Amino acid sequence: MRRWSRKSYLFMYFLVMWFAAISFQAQAANQVSVFSKPVVLRGSLGSDQVEMQLRPKLDEPDSVEGSYIVFNGKRNHGNKIVVAGEVSGTKVTMEESEDGVDVCGQWDGVLHGSNFRGVWQSDDGQTKLDFNLEISKMKMPKTKHKVRPSSKLH
């Protein structure tokens, strides 16, 4: 029986590492593509139910922006809370603002397929809540009237 040489072991090691790197890059590319178009996420933030809408930032690759609402108006009286952040592989980090100016919280999470989970914390770090959101298909709002293009547009 033939024994493997040290070169053979090294070759096999580098081959396995190469395949692992390719697999990781493919997984990361797939996760980034989740945010290549607008998405809706629904789930929990602590004990509250939320719905978040995210879309890619047009001027910054690997960045997202959007908003979310807390159902039953428990936070911000049911008004939208804006979010913006970066996507790096499967990791997503976003800051949020209730007034569109001042940061009031941060989302740090990881994508696993269609699931986005992690920890939200207030800007002062005093409050930390787990979140668990599922990506669902975005439904476009229905209009009551048919929209017709105007011939007067220039």
Image (cartoon, helix red, strand yellow):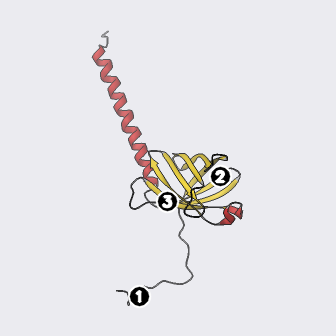
Task: Give the quarter of the figure containing the N terminus.
Answer: top left
Residue 94 lies, with reference to residue 26, above or below; the image says: below
Q: Nearer the viewer, residue 15 or 77?
A: 77
Find disc 1 in the rendering and name its residue: 150
Residue 60 lies, with reference to residue 119, above or below; the image says: below
Residue 119 drawn at (x, y percent) = 60, 45
Q: Secondary structure at mark 2?
A: strand
- Mark number displayed over residue 65: 3
Find disc 2 in the rendering and name its residue: 45
Q: Residue at x 43, y 57 (%)?
A: 36
Instruction: Tell me which corner region of the image, top left, top right, bottom left or bottom right, holds residue 60.
Output: bottom left
Q: Residue at x 46, y 49 (%)?
A: 87
Mark 3 vs 2, N-terminal side? 2
Q: Secondary structure at mark 1?
A: loop
What amino acid type is highlighted by mark number 2? Leu
In space, the residues marked 3 and 1 are separated at their CA atoms by 31 Å
Label 3 or label 1, whichever lies nearer to me, is: 3
What amino acid type is highlighted by mark number 3? Glu
Q: Secondary structure at mark 3?
A: strand
State left or right for residue 48 relative to residue 8: right
Residue 76 drawn at (x, y percent) = 67, 63
| Dot 3 crowding, Cα within 10 Å, few <14, some 14–19, many 20+ | many
In space, the residues marked 3 and 2 are separated at their CA atoms by 18 Å
Mark 3 vs 1, N-terminal side? 3
Q: Residue furthest top?
A: 1
Q: Residue at x 60, y 65 (%)?
A: 80
Q: Residue at x 63, y 46 (%)?
A: 125
